[in-house]
Image: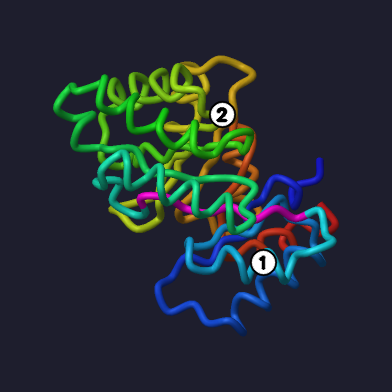
Amino acid sequence: MNLAGLIDHTILKPDASKSELERVCGEAVEYGFASVCVNGCNVEYACSMLKGSSVKVACVVGFPLGAMHPLAKAFEARTAMESGAGEIDMVMNVGAFKDGDYDMVLEDIKSVVEAAKDAAVKVIIETCLLSREEIAKASKLVKDSGAVFVKTSTGFSRSGANEEDIALIRSAVGPDFGIKASGGIRTYEDAMRMVEAGATRIGASLSVDIVRGGEGK
């Protein structure tokens, strides 16, 4: 298995510099990561660094809280696409979901899916804020929305991905839907546990360490 090809190499910290972006993009090309995941202001620069490579640029939308108006998220997604993004990682409106306003949640996601056109949209449900029943319900809503991935976490909340949540999401969405495990994945062993539980994409900032940790295994 090509683990590197499942990894979104991530740099989302607020003080990310151009030199750090250059390093991350260079690593993504060297190791063959699926994408580099960045904030919207860095999409155009990341695209310039990755031009001519097979590595995509993924852009976060409504990050990290998900509490923006659907129109604002749609605008953010359109701007990211116009700047060259190939994938969108958006944050679900967790408050609306907790209130049982599922129409609002679907409207929110669909507005981004429509703005993203043919690009893959991954929806962050922030599993650490949800019960097991809510994780299953949110995952099914994402599947119904037109997005193509359920993503566990922003990495900016209480905790990140774990195998139990990945397995629960897989049981909710079926065998063919995308699942991205993110948050707290630091080693090769961490990543493999997520894959074995059902993840088809990994989000990590320590991607190089993860891949190097699996060399020879």
Q: Which residue is mark 1?
A: 209
Region in magenta: 55-62
Which-is-in-front pick, marks 2 and 1? 2
Observer-nearest residue: 160 or 116?
116
Mark 2 burial class by Cα count in 10 Å: few <14, some 14-19, many 20+:
some
Q: Residue 111 at what x, y percent from top left?
A: 40, 33
**What's the amino acid at mark 2?**
Val
The verdict on residue 198 being magenta is no
Q: Spatial distance from mark 2 to mark 1, Cα to Cα?
A: 28 Å
Can you tell which mark lies on residue 122? none
Which of disc 1 and disc 2 is earlier in sequence?
A: 2
Up the image or down, 95 lies above or below 175; here it is: below
In the displayed orientation, state which residue is furthest to the left: 99
Percent x, y for residue 205?
56, 64
Depicted 127 relative to depicted 56: above or below: above
Percent across and percent down for residue 196 are 63, 33
Q: Main secondary structure of the magenta part?
A: strand
Q: Secondary structure at mark 2?
A: loop
- Amino acid at pointer 1: Asp
**Residue at 37 percent of width and 21 percent of height:** 136
Q: Indicate which disc residue 148 carries.
A: 2
Residue 108 image position (x, y, % from top left): 33, 33
